[in-house]
Image (cartoon, grey):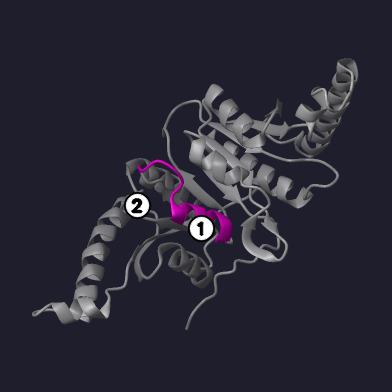
Amino acid sequence: MERFKKILFFADPQGTNDTALNRAVDLAERQGARLTVVDVVEAVPAEVGRLLRSWSSEQLARLLHEERAAELESIAERARDRQVRTEVRVLTGTPFLEVIREVLRGGHDLVIKGTTPAPGLDSTDMHLMRKCPVPLWVLKGSYGREPFRILAAVDPGPEEPADLNHKILELAHSLALREGAELHVAHAWQLAGEHILRSGRAHMPTDEVETLMAGVKESHWRWLNELLAHYARRKVRAVPHLLQGNPAAALTDFAAEQEVDLIVMGTVARTGLAGFFIGNTAETVLERADCSLLAVKPDGFRTPVQLVE
């Protein structure tokens, strides 16, 4: 069973709320994990100190650190009251860079953060999804609703990375068992060039297009069932769903219809371009879905972010 041992909670003031904090503390308590509460403050430019009469830039930076540390301690006390081993860190620099560096320094195996209230995809969320080396749980939507529903989004097939699909399912099964949640597994597919085949330019009869669609659909069902056969004896039954259409749209629509609370899905780094996706499905799902998302990297992923001495 997958279990998190060291959880990093990014207490960004723009995205942190009781929902995000409660989920982080609950998970740490149930998993018996250590919890580190962090935030990142920007460095105080030297010119600011020159404009102040009573404060240097170093003194102002120290004050900002102390104020934020006191705020984080109040968050940490709520976790400690539930016997969760919790520490606080205030970092300086660019938020996504310092969070990833803290992950690398501290050996954390999960990052949790809330979403910002502003529309669209926050740049910090985007960078963390692309570059964070451990699973990233971005929290939004409801909390505490029953039954809790988890949707594992997989992409089976002979040309897809099997290790990532299994990583997604292992994690989703583990969380479903610990949360007492319903588990759904979805695979979204579409026929490349379908609109061209159905147009007059291709000169393909409608019945041939339908026969082709049926054959492709059957293949995807087979791949999904072959993948789920490995999990047939698990305590939590996974309900399979084959969705047709653009993956991001199909997954977000399905999640809304089924009142899903958490989507677990993968992000894949493109060879030679560290930190970028093949496609932007996970980003689009995070931006459009009204539920939380747990983004998982494939085995062997290496973050382009480096530790600094």
Question: Residue 198: x, y in percent?
Answer: 80, 23
The magenta stretch spans which residues?
117-132
Sequence-earlier tag: 2 or 1: 2
* SS category of the residue bearing label 2: helix
Q: Is residue 4 left or right of residue 211?
A: left
Q: Residue at x 71, y 34 (%)?
A: 187
What residue did someone put label 2 on? Answer: 79
Residue found at the far bottom of this picture? 309
State the mark number for residue 296.
none
Q: Nearer the viewer, residue 76 or 195?
A: 195
Hey, which quadrant is residue 129 in on the image?
bottom right
What residue did someone put label 1 on? Answer: 127
Q: Is residue 189 left or right of residue 147?
A: right
Q: Is residue 92 left or right of residue 265?
A: left
Question: Residue 258: x, y in percent?
Answer: 56, 23
Q: Nearer the viewer, residue 132 or 6?
A: 132
Q: Amino acid at mark 1?
A: His
Image depth: mark 2 or mark 1 in front: 1
Q: Residue at x 59, y 61 (%)?
A: 133
Question: Residue 231: x, y in percent?
Answer: 75, 37
Judge whether residue 134 can be spotted in this image.
no
Q: Amino acid at mark 2?
A: Ala
Question: Residue 269: x, y in percent?
Answer: 67, 58
Residue 119 part of the magenta-drawn span: yes
**Separation of disc 2 and disc 1 at Cα?**
27 Å
Residue 228 part of the magenta-drawn span: no
